[in-house]
Amino acid sequence: MTQQKSHFREELDIIPRGWVIASVVGFAAIEVLFHVLIPMWAHHQDLPPEPWWALIGLVAAFAMAVTILLIGYVYADSKRRGMNPILWTLLVILVPKLFGFIAYFLLRKPLLEPCPNCKSPVGPGFAYCPKCGYAIMPSCSNCGRAIQRDHLCCPYCGKAVTARV
C-alpha cells in the first residue's frame, strides 16, 4: 500500500516564520490575560469556576493563534498567486466574522506555474511565457489549436506536426 503525501503540510509550510511567532505570542498573551490579568482585576468576582475558566482561556488562546496563522497564510498564499498580499491581509483582518477569509478563498486566483524554460511564474492557460516567449502549450501550424509536445500529427486536423517549439 502506498502512502500519499499530504498537501496540508506543504500548505502550512508557506506561512512565514514571523506569523508563526506572532501566533505563539498571541496564544501566550491570551493565556496571561485569562490567568493573571482578568482574575487580578475582577478579584474572582463573577468568574466561572476555575476548570471552566481555564478551558475558556485555552479555547480563546487557541482561537487567537489559529486566526493569526490564517492571516499569515492569506498573506503568503496571495503573494504566491500574484495577488496584492497587503490588500488581502488587511481585508481578512478588517472584515468581521470570517467574511474576509471566505471572500479570499472564493476570489483567489489559481496558482501560478513556473515556466519550463525560464522558471518565471506563468498563469494557467497561458500559451506562451510572457518573459521569454517559450511556447508552454504548442499549437498546430495548420489549424492553430493547442497540441501536446509529443504529438506527431494534430489530433484535430490530421496534419503532420512539423515545427516543434
Image (cartoon, rainbow, N blue to C red):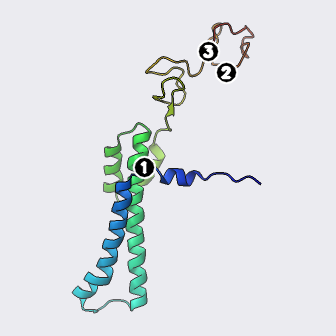
x%, y% of residue 21? 35, 61
Kind of element beneath mark 3: loop
Task: Write down the residue under mark 1.
Answer: 103
Disc 2 on helix, strand or loop?
loop
Mark nearer the viewer, 2 or 1: 2
Q: Residues within 10 Å of mark 1 (few under 14, many from 20)?
A: some
Q: Could you classify mark 3 by the number of other residues whose Cα lies within 10 Å: few (under 14), some (14-19), or many (20 or more)?
A: many
Q: Where on the picture, by quarter, is residue 139?
A: top right
Earlier along the polypeptide chain: callout 3 or callout 2?
A: 3
Q: Nearer the viewer, residue 87 or 82?
A: 82
Residue under the image location 67 percent in, 7 percent down: 162
Q: How far apart are the alpha carbons under marks 3 and 1?
A: 36 Å
Measure the alpha-carbon separation of dots 2 and 1.
Answer: 36 Å
Image spot of residue 84 (x, y percent) = 35, 40
Farthest residue to the right: give it.
1
* Residue labelled with disc 3: 139
